[in-house]
Amino acid sequence: MSQQKFYDVYVSYPPGIDRERINACLLDNLPENEANDLIQALAERPQAIIAENCTKDERENAQQYFSYLGLDVIIRHSLELMPDDTEEEDKVQPIVDQCPVCRTMIDNPEETAECPTCRLHFATATEAVIARKRIEWEEKVAFEHKKQQEIAHRMQLEKLAEEKRLRKQIRAELEEKMEKELGMPRWMSWFKGEKALITGGVILVVVIILIAAGYFLGQSGK
């Protein structure tokens, strides 16, 4: 029967994040004394332990809750309960349940060395690497989001144009059908819709020509 594993849970400020904003979030969501103790611990060292000797369920609950509060969560095997032949504390690799760059949840954190989404290698990821890759990832996400918005907008415009064309076609067909049913002369169709504009333009040109012709005839007769 395999020995049950226990874990220690640490938290830290994410790189490049406004710490005062996270502190305010901690004060809003934790009991005042716990929030102040955690803020003080994070002010004194890069990582602060929040739970020891946790079961897997307790570890996952802590990871989910403190990630929600804006902190990075680091999971390590509980050294007190590990076999005697385990490595020293500084050699124990953190267990990453959630990628610190793209926030992808890791299904098998104990067996996963690299994020399947952004390809961050957990064992060698320093704070500087995480900060740089997080910026790159957010830029990529923002670009993809903008591109999708532009595609959706273009498709919407094309849809509206097609709907307008279809409505115009249907209206013309219905008007033609109605004219046939009412027995209207075909020449009257020239005074409906776009044809009316064309007919009006032709009539206007003819009138201008006639007026001009009359004017020149009048001038020549003097």
Image (cartoon, grey):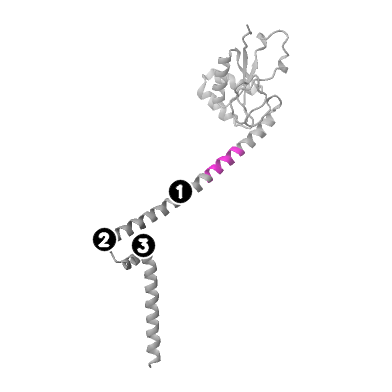
Q: Secondary structure at mark 3?
A: helix
Which residue has dot 1 on it? 159
Can you tell which quarter of the image residue 7 is in? top right
> Image point 39% across, 68% down: which residue?
198
Queried whether the magenta region covers residue 131, the answer comes back as no
Can you tell which quarter of the image residue 119 is in? top right
Which quadrant does the C terminus fall into?
bottom left
Side of 215 where 63 appears, left or right: right
Q: Count the marks: how many?
A: 3
Q: Amino acid at mark 1?
A: Lys
Q: Position of residue 122 (x, y in %)?
A: 68, 25
Q: How many angstroms separate mark 2 from mark 1 (CA)?
A: 34 Å
Q: Position of residue 22 (x, y in %)?
A: 57, 28
Q: Position of residue 199 (x, y in %)?
A: 37, 69
Q: Nearer the viewer, residue 205 or 72?
A: 205
> Image point 42% across, 50% down: which residue?
163
Q: Earlier in the sequence, mark 3 or mark 1?
A: 1
Q: Secondary structure at mark 2?
A: helix
Marks 3 and 2 in Cβ contact (< 8 Å): no
Which quadrant does the N terminus fall into?
top right
Which residue has dot 3 on it? 193
Task: Tell me which segment is drawn in magenta.
Answer: 139-150
- Can you tell which mark lies on residue 182? 2
Marks 2 and 1 in Cβ contact (< 8 Å): no
Q: Residue furthest bottom?
A: 222
